[in-house]
Image: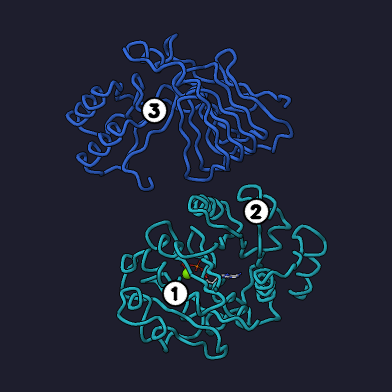
Amino acid sequence: MGEVIVITSGKGGVGKSTTTASLGVGLAMRGKKVALIDTDTGLRNLDILLGLERRIVYTLVDVAQKRVNYGQALVRHKKYSNLFLLPTSQVADKTAIEPEQMKQLVDTMRNEFDFILIDCPAGIEQGFQTAVIGADWAVVVTIPEVSAVRDADKIIGRLQAVNKDIKLIVNRIDPQMVKAGTMLDMTSIDDILSLPCIGQIPDDREVINASNQGIPIIEWSNTAAGRAYNDVVGRICGEDIPFKPFETEGFFARLKHVFGH
Amino acid sequence: MGDEVFKLKGNQTGLQLVFAPGIAFETLRNEIQKRLESGSQFFKRGTVIQLVPDQLSKENEESLRKLFHQYGVLFRVEPIEDVSKARRPIPKQKAPETNIPAAQAAAKESPAEPKPAEEHRMMVINRTVRSGQEIQTQGSVLICGNVNPGAEIIAGGSIDIRGTCRGIVHAGAYGDRNSFIIADCLMPVQIRIADLIAQAPDSIEKPAYAEKASVKNNQIIIEPIER
Ligand SMILES: Nc1ncnc2c1ncn2[C@@H]1O[C@H](COP(=O)(O)OP(=O)(O)OP(=O)(O)O)[C@@H](O)[C@H]1O
Ligand SMILES: [Mg+2]
């Protein structure tokens, strides 16, 4: 039976889709059979991040409304043959899929896949309910910004109310800002959210560069963000990968090296 | 304002009715009626509900006043006073206009006062209260967890937080100035006890000791305690 993980955040634009795409590729690189489900109906973009836009025939809406089987809607990744995308519709809106339909779908699909990652839309409306209902546990993505942490906290409250296990990924950490004390550091984030953290992803302009080419950043294994995502995948697979603590010499030394300072 | 049509916010002298501007009066009135009928704890007899003037027409204000009156709730249209900025210990506050805080005065007029047993009941919350969550109780409350920014605790009695408090806490919400607030780490944006409000300074350092906020000489003071 596969594991179903929803990637959520509360605040928009913090890196849910970027994270979903990279974790999907990372798990596939480790030989897992993976399905990614885009639930951001009307604002889909996971397909673009994976370079699969042109291959879409059917969508999640067709599947949920039982017009086709999920197998007919799945799009296979060009490079990783055990990675699939279940795209959503660009024209329908979030009311097109009922949470209950989503739960049924996910429960059927988990017989076939090792991992199902669900990319959640921003916000706390029906789209959120739909994305979350079938998941075993949730990844909450946030960035080191007071408002994003506040929204993450709200989402965490909602997820805990429905008894989901939650793990945290802090994205777009700018080591120089942390060093200068102008950015929330991990300790202050942990102080408020108090969740187990499985990822600390640096802010890295290569992410945008890769996305524009339809390549999840994890494929660029020599980038700072790519490496950080690779560590996250390891942790999801149960490996004990230590964090490079942000405030210590070690981390900055490493980043300086990465950035070639 | 989330999923609700209206919200009640605790302030110096009662609860303030707030709603999105432009909302249809019918909807507002219906929602309030629903809440009143649901017997929601917060509409205890004698509660004062305030509304900032000029938000509704006079007829509509009167209509709400009648509605609340049916349930023994006092509805007043009056300006809400400014919150006084406070430091630690919190220096200056507005003393209430009268000797008796309005909430208490209101309770006196009301024939049906709550049973003491109900007021002294202790609610226990065994988790962290997160942004957007609100805990309301007529009695006292013990929170084994943190109160995060954006969370609100409103208690008729006292509040004890076994954790860090960064949200809004209101003890003695019906006017009891003997209520107090204790936290392992007390750093809320705002503390309210009965009719008094203290606002945190812009930057607070994390206190190293458990602290207690209580009312002395008409002002909220904060002192370290042992536990
Ligand atoms: N670590 C990073 N470094 C630099 N840029 C990043 C990083 N992570 C994400 N971004 C950029 O931030 C933007 C938003 O990312 P993304 O679309 O993944 O967020 P989202 O949470 O899915 O947004 P939405 O809420 O709209 O669905 C994109 O332009 C992406 O390239
Ligand atoms: Mg997205």
Check disc 3 and report the residue beneath it: B15
Amino acid type shown at disc 1: Thr
Q: Are marks 1 and 2 on the same chain?
A: yes
Q: Which mark is residue B210?
A: none
Check disc 2 and report the residue beneath it: A184
Residue lying farthest to the left in this orientation? B59
Q: Is residue B130 above or below residue B104?
A: below
Q: Are marks 3 and 1 on the same chain?
A: no
- Chain coloured cyan: which letter? A
- Chain coloured blue: which letter? B
Check disc 1 and report the residue beneath it: A108
Mark 3 or 2: in front is 3
Chain under callout 3: B
In the image, A46 versus A109, the foreground residue is: A109
In the image, A182 versus A52, the foreground residue is: A52
Q: Is mark 2 within 8 Å of ligand 1?
A: no
Q: Is mark 3 within 8 Å of ligand 1?
A: no
The C terminus of chain B appears in which quarter of the rendering?
top right
- Answer with the quarter of the image where residue A102 lies: bottom left
In the image, B198 versus A142, the foreground residue is: A142
Q: Alpha-carbon distance for marks 3 and 1?
A: 50 Å
Chain under callout 2: A
